[in-house]
Image: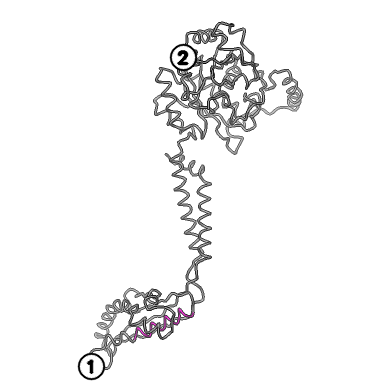
């Protein structure tokens, strides 16, 4: 993954990261609220040697005091100090409990000793700190006094008495909020990374490219945007001839022509790895786009298990491909018109679809259609659930594999391509379908459209309903071009593969 992939990953998973960041902040507030405030009071002692007024002796004494003061710090929390203090102040705690409230600090290269007491009550913290300092000075004087001597050579003086603290040292709201936020963001990022590593769905053209690279074969020929407003129309150009979705299919049409510049594919089978990936919609729109280019096109519904082309276009399904294959009719007799292109529906569903699609009769029908039309687009069954689609490999020039954004897994795409390659089929390429549109609807290539004049717009509003009632194309563009038919209101575009296998 490069930097752009990581940025896309963070943008895609920002909800998880933000939610846990907010949760961590809330936990910080909660912890601050339930934590009992703690106060700290500090007293300072100075360690010196008595009766050393000579300069040399004074320097020696200072070095001696620095060495001794570090050892003294361990005595502060000993029972010699804590027991008398607890008894004197009548504290409701044991000497060991009192010792846990005391901390000492010896500043570097000094003879100072700081005694800090932490307690829930500010006044008691100051009293304990001062009492510990006094008792500690007495204990050290006894320890350092030589046997038989009246005075100790070491003297501890309190240079700073503890005072009542005004503000608690903990909890620290700002610190807790920062820690909670950092912990939440870290946990959110970790969870997002875990979900991303477990998510094997195809979410970008680069994902699809890597899948196809593993098979050593086809390229990504395009992507088709998900248009929520196209729920009533299977043909993108019928709803908006210059819309993003219509332009995506035109780009797909162009890229298919350049797969083999010397011998462009004429018979194209459109399939997918699993059901509900939008292959039927791609078949219909690819046929419409090829016809828009001025070619004669025949769309064949060869999904003999759950056909959906006829229902999507509002045509008759009972007579079609299987009718021709069993010799009950000729292709021209059951061919239907969908405006700019012709349609050969599936016909009656047979009990043995794979055998029929792998038969010589099917190949003969396809050859006759290829002789009659410039292009033949065949809508097929998904590759992985059934064996129908690989069976027709010898009858087509190549396969176009549809993969649905965030639904098709990388493994499914790879397995589908290899299943076709195993039977010697040519995979022309793949198309990423139902890609969410970006927020900016005027992206490069989509905002560039002719602005209709007032007269043209009035004609469009008047003629479009009339043409629809007559079952004729209703798109009026800048130049005359065949358009797609009015389509029956069936299923939403996100589920327009109702004819696929489940």
Instruction: Determine whether 18 is above or below 333 in the image.
Output: below
Dot 1 lies on which element? loop
Residue identified by numbered label 1 = 148
Q: Which structural element holds mark 2?
A: loop
Disc 2 residue crowd, few under 14, some 14–19, many 20+, Cα 10 Å: few
Q: How many marks?
A: 2
Q: What residue occupies the far left of the structure in this picture?
A: 147
Circles 1 and 2: CB atoms closer than 8 Å: no
Q: In the rendered image, which residue does mark 2 sit on?
A: 262
Could you say which quadrant of the image residue 102 lies in?
bottom left
Question: Which residues lie in the magenta part?
Answer: 123-137
If the image is split into quadrants, where does the N terminus sit? Answer: top left
Q: Is residue 251 among the parts visible in the rendering?
A: no
Labelled disc at residue 53: none
Q: Point out residue 156 in the picture as x, y percentages from the top left corner.
A: 34, 85
Q: Position of residue 266 (x, y in %)?
A: 51, 14
For marks 1 and 2, give the CA distance: 116 Å
């Amino acid at each position: 993954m490069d930097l752009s992939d990581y940025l896309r990953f963070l943008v895609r998973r920002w909800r998880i990261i933000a939610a846990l960041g907010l949760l961590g902040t809330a936990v910080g507030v909660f912890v601050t609220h339930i934590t009992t405030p703690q106060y700290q009071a500090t007293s300072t002692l100075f360690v010196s040697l008595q009766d050393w007024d000579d300069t040399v002796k004074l320097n020696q004494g200072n070095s001696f005091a620095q060495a001794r003061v570090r050892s003294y710090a361990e005595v502060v929390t000993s029972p010699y100090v804590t027991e008398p203090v607890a008894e004197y102040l009548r504290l409701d705690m044991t000497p060991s409990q009192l010792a846990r409230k005391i901390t000492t600090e010896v500043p570097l290269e000094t003879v100072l000793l700081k005694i800090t007491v932490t307690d829930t009550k500010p006044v008691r913290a100051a009293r304990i700190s001062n009492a510990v300092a006094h008792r500690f000075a007495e204990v050290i004087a006894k320890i350092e006094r030589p046997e038989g001597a009246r005075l100790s050579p070491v003297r501890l003086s309190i240079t700073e008495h503890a005072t009542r603290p005004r503000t608690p040292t903990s909890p620290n709201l700002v610190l807790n909020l920062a820690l909670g936020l950092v912990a939440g963001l870290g946990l959110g990022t970790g969870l997002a990374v875990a979900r991303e590593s477990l998510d094997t769905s195809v979410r970008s053209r680069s994902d699809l490219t890597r899948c196809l690279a593993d098979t050593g074969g086809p390229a990504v020929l395009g992507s088709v945007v998900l248009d929520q407003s196209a729920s009533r129309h299977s043909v993108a150009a019928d709803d908006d001839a210059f819309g993003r979705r219509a332009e995506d299919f035109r780009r797909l049409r162009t890229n298919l022509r350049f797969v083999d510049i010397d011998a462009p594919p004429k018979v194209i089978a459109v399939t997918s790895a699993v059901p509900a990936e939008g292959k039927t919609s791609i078949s219909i729109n690819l046929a419409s786009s090829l016809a828009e280019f001025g070619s004669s096109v025949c769309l064949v519904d060869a999904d003999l298990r759950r056909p959906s082309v006829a229902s999507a276009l509002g045509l008759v399904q009972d007579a079609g491909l299987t009718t021709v294959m069993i010799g009950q009719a000729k292709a021209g007799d059951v061919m239907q018109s969908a405006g700019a292109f012709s349609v050969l529906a599936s016909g009656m569903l047979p009990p043995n679809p794979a055998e029929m699609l792998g038969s010589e009769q099917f190949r003969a029908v396809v050859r006759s259609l290829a002789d009659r039309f410039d292009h033949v687009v065949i809508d097929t069954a998904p590759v992985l659930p059934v064996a129908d689609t690989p069976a027709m490999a010898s009858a087509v020039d190549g396969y176009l594999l549809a993969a649905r954004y965030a639904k098709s897994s990388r493994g499914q795409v790879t397995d589908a391509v290899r299943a076709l390659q195993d039977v010697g089929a040519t995979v022309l390429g793949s198309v990423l379908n139902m890609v969410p549109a970006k927020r900016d609807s005027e992206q490069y290539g989509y905002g560039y459209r002719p602005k209709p004049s007032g007269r043209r717009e009035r004609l469009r509003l008047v003629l479009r309903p009339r043409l629809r009632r007559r079952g004729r194309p209703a798109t009026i563009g800048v130049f005359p071009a065949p358009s797609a038919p009015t389509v029956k209101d069936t299923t939403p575009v996100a589920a327009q593969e109702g004819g696929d296998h489940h």
